[in-house]
Image (spheres, helix red, strand yellow):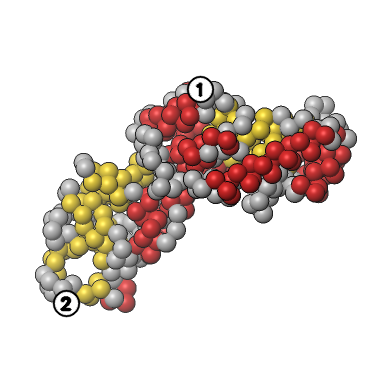
Amino acid sequence: MRSRPTQAVVDLDAIASNFHLLQSRAGGRAVYAVVKADAYGHGAAAVARRLRREGADRFAVATVEEAVALRREGARGELLVLGGARGADAVVARGYGLTVAVHDLEQARALAAATASFPSALPVHLKLDTGMGRLGVRREELAKLALVVRGSAGLAVTGAFTQLASGEDAGLEPTAGQIDALREGLAALREAGVGPGTVHVANSGAMLVHPDALFDAVRPGLGLYGVLPSEEIPNPGLLPAMSLETQVLVAKDVPSGTPLGYGGRFKTSRASRIAVLPIGYHDGFRRAFSGRVAVLLRGKRAPVVGVVSMDLTLVDATEAGAAPGDRVVLMGRVGADAVTAWDLARAAGTIPWEILCGIGPRVPRVYSQAVLPN
């Protein structure tokens, strides 16, 4: 039972289209579809099932828990855990058929010890730190890492990768420097007797603006969901896959000078029709949007007024008109007009990744294309 009409509508056909477009940009290279963070808020199980139907056979997540949840939902194909795993996770990783990132020397030693008695080796991808400064083995530790993996019967290196700090930036210098550092690191591994396997670097942005970053495989994330990682990148045809919508709960007429919302920070400057929407910051419609964004109502823009609260938002529907039950689009397209993830991100001083991932769990995901079984 649903007591409120707020929902995130996910177009799986759009995600399929985006996958094929990015696959073509990859030029025959393997594609790791990034479905971490619940597929950037779109629903990892449903997205993985649809992409599997489209031919995807490699997926990337952030944690062992995310990978296990996908396997339990029936996900097939390779599941790469980008955030790695502890030694204590090795049995689970092997049991669920996972590939895990090795990003630290001590972590590598712990995994080697934990897998020593395994009848078959646990596949791992080596993550190199080429300038991001987060997870990844630095160049000066690669020889030690090679000793660990060469001496471990329980670990099988099947890939190597790095994380680009500015992959969506068309400027060559930062990314070119990281690519050069990666090539040096791969050469060092080979010299130490470790083949790197499948090498992957390019995220969505790098796929679109840095062809030198393609290597053996690619890892599109945001682009799968139809959002460009930079507004400076021309759109090659990606389709936004999610719209956030609700219905007018209450519509009321108020006189000029009426304070609205917590603190009465906004007062009407005219007789106004105010629509109350059943969505708030717990749902991911942020307090930072207060007075900074508009929603689409009856084909017109209705600005948010007053402070967005936890469960409710007010909009000025004087120009648009409003009645209870009217459809309201808070992110998405209606006719020729649209409110994009980038529009909301600018209003909140953040990035579209955070907007999509921030749509809360009490907002049901409704799929415009039926999610078929594997």
- At 17% from the left edge and 59% from the top edge, which residue is drawn? 317
- At 30% from the left edge and 59% from the top edge, which residue is drawn? 293
Whether residue 100 is visible: no
Residue picked out by circle 1: 55
Q: Quadrant of the N terminus?
A: top left
Q: On screen, 288 above or below 196?
A: below
**Marker disc for residue 257:** 2
**Marker disc for residue 331:** none
Q: The disc labelled 1 sits on which kind of residue?
A: Gly
Residue 363 drawn at (x, y percent): 39, 49
Give left or right: position of 72 versus 158: left
Residue 212 drawn at (x, y percent): 57, 35
Q: The disc labelled 2 sits on which kind of residue?
A: Gly
Q: The residue tagged with tag 2: helix, strand or loop?
A: loop
Residue 51 drawn at (x, y percent): 48, 28
Whether residue 266 is visible: yes
Nearer to me, 341 or 81:
341
Q: On screen, 113 above or below 354?
A: above
Q: CA distance from mark 2 to mark 1?
A: 59 Å
Nearer to me, 235 or 365:
235
Label 1: how many Cα within 10 Å (few below 14, some 14–19, many 20+): few
Give left or right: position of 141 versus 279: right
Q: Nearer the viewer, mark 2 or mark 1?
A: 1
Give left or right: position of 314 versus 195: left
- At 20% from the left edge and 62% from the top edge, which residue is drawn? 316
Residue 371 drawn at (x, y percent): 42, 29
Q: On screen, 187 above or below 244?
A: above
The total of numbered circles placed on residues is 2
- At 76% from the left edge and 36% from the top edge, which residue is drawn? 187
First in sequence: mark 2 vs mark 1 = 1
Q: The residue tagged with tag 1: helix, strand or loop?
A: loop
